[in-house]
Image (cartoon, grey):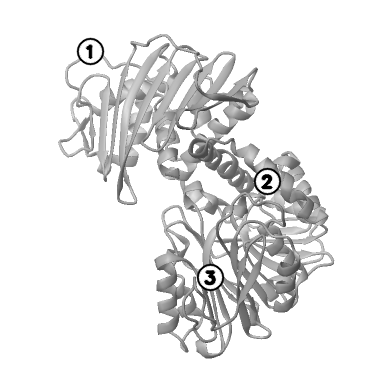
Amino acid sequence: MSRLILASALVVGLMQPCVHASDSQQIRSLSKGLAPFLNALSGSAARFRLTGKIQVDIDDEPQSINIRIALFDDDSFDLVLTHADYAVEIRRRADSTTMILPLHQMAFVGTGEVSHDFSLAPKGIVSRLVSPQSVAAPFVLLPGRQAVGALVAFGNSLLQVEQDRDSGEWLLTDDSPLRFPQPGSLLVSYDQTQVELSVTEDVPEHSNELSGVQIVEIPRPELEKTLLRGVRRATEILFPAPALKNPPQHPRRTEHGELRWVGDHRVVLLDGTPEQIGTAHGQLLKAEAVRCIESVLYTFGTVYVIKTGHWFRHALEDAYAQLAPHIPERHKRETAALASSLGMSDSTLQILNVFPEMFHCSGFAVFNTATKDGKLYHGRVLDYMTTIGLQDAATTFIVKPDGYIPFANVGYASFIGSVSGMNNKAVSLGEMGGKGQGNWDGVPMATLMRRALEECTTLDEVMQLWTESPRTCEYYYVFADGKTNTAVGVAALPESVEFIRPGQSHARLGEGIPDSIVLSAGSRLETLRGRVSDKHGQIDAEIGKWLMSRPVAMQSNLHNVLFIPADGVLHVANASHTRPAAEEPYVELNLSELLESMTPARLQTTQR
């Protein structure tokens, strides 16, 4: 559903504003057929109405979205998206913006002035909606004739076009998935996706009536920025430019921080006080942090609002208000320094770091008789929404905080908590989300995970931390200790905590497997249990990675980690824009060697 909403919003962004086609006969020329749509991107149409339908198969289920856009003037438009499971209407006027959710009987209304950079005003909106880091940019930001040339250069084989030797025009062949059935209409049919659009200058008068809905006032700059930046980031996620798919691997240093590349993997080393760590984090990963923040607060946030009827930032603010008393002051100081380094407000980074409370996953630990060499192998699968582009910010942090235990944290730029980590005391942790979202009277999961990495030297200390700490929601974990070659599974709820020992049978996990902890759900649990049982006694690092392959890892698999705590080694794989982490190569990182390589002070400051 998230990808469907993003795709529909992106089509809307790329196609507005538009002009009508000429009254010529059936159009077969690519340049002539696209001209009404591409030329419209310059804003030459004073008024228009565009209607259309997107039909696409997602997870083998046919989905259909109806689109209607009406442009009234340089400041005003209506946008309506309708699907069987959701509906949204955006009404923008010169002095107000309204987001109506008919299925939830809600309307978010903002009034007043808006900065041009974050405005939804129709005039010139495409340059603000489409990111230069998207391959869509050349097609929508260039004048019409140049855009056609760029489109042909990019997709000649896909479009099935040929150039007339005499006129120089690009003509569609009979095999092209692109058609212009009549003037002012367009049909694209490709790979189980069909888009139909038509445009006219016959535009009815707009309506400002609101009835039968609950009205919630939102600052207009926040409302428009959320929608604008959500679509802009979606253009990067759905159609990433080469620089996002294969980022330049330039190592950088700053005081108390260093960015290295190990293979294609981003590794950031941080040390010092909370303020020094937070500042270096922001200096080294500003672009990645901004993309991550926009993915969460704006792109995911827009989808969340449409699906739930609740304003996403309000939900995060409410959660943070309850969680804040349980967050260590040193973490708040680090977050504040990170926010300052990024040029953002403390509150933005505070609420952003609540987001990992929504992650879901699988995990296992095998050791002694279960493994080939008796060594402990701890696998961790993070399955969560590759569709919002968090992989663009994927980073493994090696952190040496003053006065606390150094650790490796497999995470994402702008997040300071942990969902997958190992410290230099051979303790490793991974989590699996459960139910109960909204129970926020406790320590945030990612904060508790990081505290364990920073504070705990043994498995018993980790278990004690979980027992004594107030907990949120429902989470499952695998904790492991390479020093004692043992592990536990954990079922943690706000009111109780249960530790599942190796080989123990459990009603939700099945019959125990000797010297093994196996956590997952549904068919993925059955597959993982079968694999561990079949390979029992043979498991090594390579088989450990195989245990986490598809379908144990979901299509939404953001990262996989295989911890070998006794060796201080972790193997990490991150998702790409086209493949889940389980289908990407792993990179081996040696925590001990990375920590030893860190110098006490780094005096060379690098600004991006």
Q: Badge 2 is on which residue?
A: 319
Q: Position of residue 56 (x, y in %)?
A: 31, 42
- Quarter that holds the N terminus: top left
Quadrant in which residue 597 is drawn: bottom right
Q: As drawn, is 366 to the left or to the right of 40?
A: right
The residue under the point 41% across, 39% down is 7
Vertical comparison of 601 with 538: above or below: above
Q: Badge 1 local density, few (<14 within 10 Å), some, or many (20+)? A: few
Mark found first going from the N terminus, 2 or 1: 1
Q: Amino acid at mark 3?
A: Gly
Quadrant in which residue 162 is drawn: top left
The residues bearing labels 2 and 1 have C-alpha atoms spaced at a distance of 57 Å
In the structure shown, which secondary structural element does the residue marked by tag 1 occupy?
loop
Q: As drawn, is 495 to the left or to the right of 402?
A: left
Q: Badge 2 local density, few (<14 within 10 Å), some, or many (20+)? A: many
The residue under the point 53% across, 59% down is 360
Q: Position of residue 140 (x, y in %)?
A: 42, 30
Q: Position of residue 219 (x, y in %)?
A: 65, 25
Residue closer to the observer: 363 or 20: 363
Q: Amino acid at mark 2?
A: Ala
Q: Badge 3 is on which residue?
A: 363
Mark found first going from the N terminus, 3 or 1: 1
The residue under the point 38% across, 10% down is 204
Q: Amino acid at mark 1?
A: Asp
Q: Position of residue 261 (x, y in %)?
A: 60, 62
The residue under the point 69% across, 76% down is 592
